Structures are given as C-alpha cells and as structure tokens.
Image: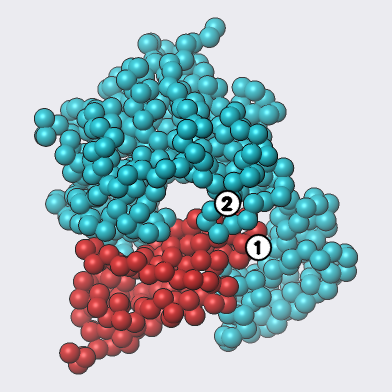
Amino acid sequence: MAKRTVYIGCGAGFAGDRWDAAVPVVATLARRDGPRYLMFETLAERTLALAQQARIENPEAGYSQYLERYVRPVMRDAKAAGIRIVSNFGAANPLGGARKLLAMAREEGIDGLKVAVVDGDDLTAVMTEAEIRDHAPVEGLDMPEGKMVAANVYLGAQPIAEALALGADIVVVGRCSDPALALGPLLHEFGWPLDDLDRIAAGTLAGHLLECGAQVTGGYFADPGFKDVPDFGRVGFPIAEVTADGAITITKADDTGGLVSHRTVKEQILYEMHDPSAYLTPDVTLDITGVTVKEVGPDRVSVTGARGKPMPPTLKATLSFEGGWLGEGEITYAGPNARRRAELAIDVLRERARGLGTNWPLRFDLIGTVATFDGDDGDLRAGRDYSSDGEYRVRMATRGPDKQMAQWIADEVLSLYCSGPAGGAGVRHRIAPQVTTASILIDRARVNPTARLVEETA
Amino acid sequence: MMSNTVTTKLHAVAHGRTGDKGNRVNISVIPYHDEAWPYLLDQLTPARIQAHFAHKGAGEVTRYELPNLPAMNFVIDDVLQGGVNASLNLDGHGKSLAFHLLDLEVTVPASCVVSG
C-alpha cells in the first residue's frame, strides 16, 4: 500500500501559459502505471472578474478562454490512457465550461467522457453586496469603491475529491485554492482523513510545487552563468509522484528541456509564501519550516517534512471591482544626447498632462535606467548617473475614473512625434479598463460546495 | 574566520524569487553554498532591507528563517505603492524586485561566491 504512487502532472501555471506544454506531460504519464492526473491552473485573481463580465454579456461564456486551447491537444490521449484532468478553468461558469468540453469530445469522436463541475465558490449567491462589503479586507489593501463585479470564495480539495468519486474524467472548478487541484486527487486516491494533518499538508505542498507549471522546472529561474537551464526553449512541465505516506518526488515530462534541482524546488517552495510556518489554505495550515529537499536522481528531487496544523476557521474570498482606467504611453530616444532629450520629453508631458486640468497621479519612467525598481517619484534614478548617450524609453502612466481623460493623457505621448524633442521614435500608447481587488475572510458555514456530473445537452 | 573574505553583490552568493499578495511582496534568498548562511543572517537584517526599499514606501519587513533549506524569506509591506490595484509601475506585481534585493553587497568567504 505504501508503495502505491499517484502521478500528478501540471499543464499550465497561469492563464496565458504555453498551449502545448501538457502534450509531453500526458505522453509521459501515459507510460506510467497507477492513478494519473493532469492539472491546469488558469485563474489569477483578476482573471475571474473578466470572466464574470464576459458571462454577463453571454450566459454561455465566462469559463476560461484557454480551456479549449489547453485541453484539445491532449483530450484524446488523456482519455485513452485514463489520465484524469482537474482544473479551475471553469472560472465564472464551470457549467458552461463542462458543456464546452462535452461538445469538444463529440467533435473529436471521444465516447463516454464524463465531466463534473464543482459549484459553490460564488459568494454573491449566498450574500448581499452590502454584507460582503461589511467584511474588513486583509493583505494590506483597502476596500475598493467601484462597482463590485465578482466575489468568489477559495474552495478546498474536498469537493474535487467528491467529483472524482463520481467517476469524472475531467473536473471543472471555478475559484479554488491552487494546491487543491493536486490535493483533491490525492484525497480521492489515498482516502486521507481530514485530521491526518501531515498528509494533507504534504498533498498541499505537492500542489504548491506544481501550481506554477515550469516555475519548478527551470522556468522563471534561468539566469545565464549563474543558474543555467538546459534546452530552455523546450522547458518541460512538472510531474509530482506522491505516495500514501505523503512522500513527494518532483520530476518533469520526458524528452523535454529544463531541469529539476534542489534550487528550482527551493525557489518554488517559497514563492508567494509569507509566514513559512503558517501557509493558509482551505484544507490545512501548511508548515514548511521542517521541509528538506534532496536530489535523488537526474531531474528528481524528493521533498519531505511538511507538517500540518488545523485548517483556518475562515475561507478567503477575493472581491473584484471596476477600477477605472489606466492610460499609458512610451517613446524612445536614442543616440547622442538621448538621455537629455528623454528628460525634456518628460518635462513636456508633465506640463501638458497638468494642462488638461486633472490632478490624476502621473508616473514617469526612463526605461533603461531603474524603471521597475524605482518609486513613483523617481528617487532611485535621481541618485545615480546615466550616460547622456545611449537608448532611453520614456514612459508615462496615469490612472483615474474617466475613460476620456485617460485617452487624452495617453495621447500626449503620441503628439510628441511632431511637437516633442528631436528624434522621438516608436510610440506605443493605450488605455485599458482596470479591475481592483480585495480579499476578505468568510465564515465556513456560509459556503456549501457541491460536485455533480454534467449531462450532455443536445 | 574572516580571512579570505570578499565583498560582492548578493547576486553572486544567493538566488531568489518575488511573489506578491495585495500590497506586499515576499522575496526568497537562497544561498548557492550553505556556508554563506551565517554571513547572510548577520548582514541581511530586516532594517537593511527596509532601507533598501524605502524609496518605494516599504513599511515593515519581516524575515523568516529556514535553516533546513537553508533559505530566508523576506515579507515587505506596502512596497507596491498601492499594489496591483493602484500601482503605476510598469511592474505592478513587483516581480523584478528580487533582483533589486540581490543588488545589495555582502561580505562572505570567497568559497561562497559563484562567478557568472
């Protein structure tokens, strides 16, 4: 029993990840014996708000636009090999996503595909907006003022395990904790009781290591000369092998690039981790302070020592609001005296934007210096010397409630072509609607997740 | 003990990654060689990290220590100037900030330094 291994691969670590990453993962899993799963994590905090808006415009929409892109290349092989798929690509409409998958199966001539959905993450189904707004936000942010467009609770692994117990080949979830996409299958396979805290913790850690895809196999890690990653353009996505006692081995798809080393695993263990003795999830409070990491073979790293403490009494929910408009524009100055021409452009932009009669915040960057490290006032750049010659890209950014004003401010960058300093080139400018978010903590008794199989509709 | 030490950028001694939550980031610092651990504990104090990010309005800095790995994890409050909700920075999530931290200088035994 202790030797039974569950294999969980990851095919996407965020909405926008590579469409073809799962193909070698599925090919590798198909050569393994035992229970095998493929997870896709596709739902960042604000992605769900955009999906909710899409659903308002079209009731059939609102699942991830990446659902088809990710699943279609592996659908047939996964079904044939018995590899079951778990993903939060249901976004704001898991049922719509499930129906799309069934339609895709019909088009592909795949018979007998069973698809389940997990419902219950939509907080607006059980609470009024006023009641939701009555909760104090966490994580150092204020409650935004704009119109609320989505409110979703992070569900845990239990309803995913229930969906698998119904026989689903694919489980479509909306908002859930990312590690639950791996813990759900492990609960289903091993039947760990919820008070077996160290096992629940190990399954959560396995999910945490998988949830960002290539970030544990050399992606977002490569730093030439210091942290070299072989065959980086074909970086392979991860597979976790987990045994009933909670031992984890991280490896990756066969015949791919990338690497799994103690260093890649350590970086990902601490990614988005705050207090390492108390990583809060819906299923357990994970303590990684006793974790050890050991290379046990080529591209194989064992991770042991996760400890669990009881789950937090509340569930986290993310609220999304309409957040006004971002306006931004960029223009490049190159060659002799480029820096001074760029600085003159900044002076002109500041004068012109203020001349529009707005007090919106303005930020100016000189890309090529310390633009991303700097504060809004440019103090870091001002304290350093940069060559007058070279290549500098001016960026202006602003943000406020009014679309027209955002456009007018951004247009000031474009007008530098004829009215600005000599040699300005390569203007890009745009405005974009913004979504603001806040997180609150919800009484568990208010949330009632359910899992069910979806029948095909003609 | 301090013989044969060198002063170099942290980037040649350790690696790390940023994660964000709201208006906070966490940045891991993982030494290439375990022998660097006590030197980093001594030199990478929360006060020094806070000063290094003060131009971005950094508030409280908490340092969590994981001697098992070994690694340390810095949580820096209020450093995203409003976070992704309000930031005008090209890098609203602060994803590049690990490399700003790795720009700090440290003094360590020469054997702890990786040459690029």
The amino acid at mark 1 is Leu
Residue at the spot x=28%, y=55% of the render? A288
- Disc 2 secondary structure class: loop
Q: Is residue A405 visible?
A: yes
Pointers 2 and 1 in contact (CB under 8 A)?
Answer: no
Residue at the spot x=39%, y=15% of the render? A113
Of all chains in the rendering, the one displayed in cyan is A
Locate residue A213, reporting x and y percent: 37, 45
Q: Which residue is mark 2?
A: A137
The answer to whether dots 2 and 1 both sit on one chain is no
Q: Relative to residue A290, is residue A367 drawn left or right?
A: right
Locate residue A147, reporting x and y percent: 72, 42
Residue at the spot x=39%, y=16% of the render? A114
Locate residue A451, reporting x and y percent: 43, 22
CA gap, disc 2 and disc 1: 22 Å
The amino acid at mark 2 is Pro
The residue most toward the bottom is B3
Q: Relative to residue A412, is residue A137 drawn left or right?
A: left
Of all chains in the rendering, the one displayed in red is B
Residue closest to the eye, A250 or A70: A250
Q: Quadrant of residue B16?
A: bottom left
Q: Which residue is mark 1?
A: B88
Examine the rendered structure and indicate whether residue A142 appears above or below residue A192: below
